[in-house]
Structures are given as structure tokens and as C-alpha cells.
């Protein structure tokens, strides 16, 4: 009779989990090669139609390691609201006049030139227009 470890959702078999961990060799990811290895293992586990509790527990662990590495090495740089607006306008092929329903063209130009900030109300409207959170512009 094997021991089981209680988790929030289910019980795992320590022996089975130990074997999976021994195969995966999870550790803090420091290089792109280690990152690729862990992601490849995650993808293998993700393709399983009905993962066991042990496999799902390993997926959770590997996902944390990948997330940690990504946040340390591939963090998205913070941009200003004006930079976000300029990027989204370019991506959508828009000019200042195309945002007339949100604010006057001259206001868009002032924001893009760094002469004015984006108000909370404008951020909300821009978020709705571009289908992103208002915080992108604040």
C-alpha cells in the first residue's frame, strides 16, 4: 500500500511522481537550452489526453519554472500610454482623425508628441476601441 500526498484537488502517488520528476529533472532555468528542454517536456505532457494527477502536478511545477525564467529574461518593457497608443494606431493602420469618436485629432497629436497625458476616461474609451485594458494607456 503506497503513501499518498494530499494536494488541493487530488492525491498523488509519491513513487510515480518521483519517477516523473527524475525523468524531467526540473530545476531553476538559467539558460535558453534548459528553457527549451523544459518547454519540450511541458508540450509532451500537454498532449496527453488524460493526464494523471502526478503528471498534472509536474505540469504545474514546470509551468512555474518557465514563467519564472520568462519574467527574468524576456520581460516586456514598460511603455508609456502614448507609446502604446502610437503602436496600436500603427498596427491598426489608423491616423489621429480615425479616433475622432474618442477625442479630437489635435488631442491625439498632443498625446503622441508627449505634450499631454491620457485621461482615465480617454484610456477607457481607447481600451474599448483597441480591445485592451485601459491600464495600457495609463
Image (cartoon, rainbow, N blue to C red):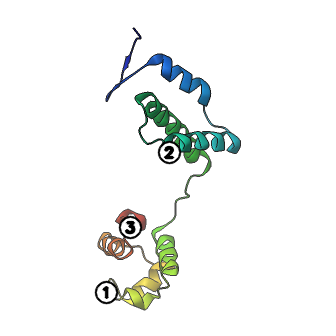
Separation (CA) of disc 2 from disc 3: 30 Å
Q: Secondary structure at mark 1?
A: loop
In percent of the image, x 31 and y 69: which residue is there? Answer: 120
User: Which type of secondary structure does the marked residue at label 3 adopt?
Assistant: loop
Task: Tell me the crowding category of disc 2: few under 14, some 14 to 19, or many 20 or more residues within 10 angstroms, Cα based.
Answer: few
Q: Quadrant of the rendered structure where residue 102 is?
A: bottom left
Determine contact: label 2, label 3, CB under 8 Å.
Answer: no
Disc 3 packing (10 Å; few <14; some 14–19; many ≥20): some
Residue depth check, mark 2 versus mark 3: number of the one nearer the observer: 2
Looking at this view, name the residue that lies furthest to the left. 121
Q: Is residue 25 visible?
A: no
The mark found on residue 80 in the picture is: none
Which of pointers 2 and 3 lies earlier in the amino acid sequence?
2
Q: CA distance from mark 1 to mark 3?
A: 17 Å
The label nearer to you, 1 versus 3, is 3
Residue at the image position 32 percent from the left and 27 percent from the top: 8
| Mark before the other along the chain sequence, 1 or 2 | 2
Please tell me whether residue 61 is drawn above or below residue 108 in the rendered image: above
Mark 1 or mark 3: which comes first in sequence? Answer: 1
Task: Identify which residue, 83 or 90, lies in the foreground.
Answer: 90
Q: Which residue is mark 1?
A: 101
Q: Quadrant of the N terminus?
A: top left
Closer-to-camera residue (102/46): 46
Residue that label 3 marks: 132
Q: Which mark is residue 47?
A: 2
Q: Circle 2 — which element?
A: loop
Task: Answer yes or no: is residue 100 visible.
Answer: yes
Amino acid at each position: 500500500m503506497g503513501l499518498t500526498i494530499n494536494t488541493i484537488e487530488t492525491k498523488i502517488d509519491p513513487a510515480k511522481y518521483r519517477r516523473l520528476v527524475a525523468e524531467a529533472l526540473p530545476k531553476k532555468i538559467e539558460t535558453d537550452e534548459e528553457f527549451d528542454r523544459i518547454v519540450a517536456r511541458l508540450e509532451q505532457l500537454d498532449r496527453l489526453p488524460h493526464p494523471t494527477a502526478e503528471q498534472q502536478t509536474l505540469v504545474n511545477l514546470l509551468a512555474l519554472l518557465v514563467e519564472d525564467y520568462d519574467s527574468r529574461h524576456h520581460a516586456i518593457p514598460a511603455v508609456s500610454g502614448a507609446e502604446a497608443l502610437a503602436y496600436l494606431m500603427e498596427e491598426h493602420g489608423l491616423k489621429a482623425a480615425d479616433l475622432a469618436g474618442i477625442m479630437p485629432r489635435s488631442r491625439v497629436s498632443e498625446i503622441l508628441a508627449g505634450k499631454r497625458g491620457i485621461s482615465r476616461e480617454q484610456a477607457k474609451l481607447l481600451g474599448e476601441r483597441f480591445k485592451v485594458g485601459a491600464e495600457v494607456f495609463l
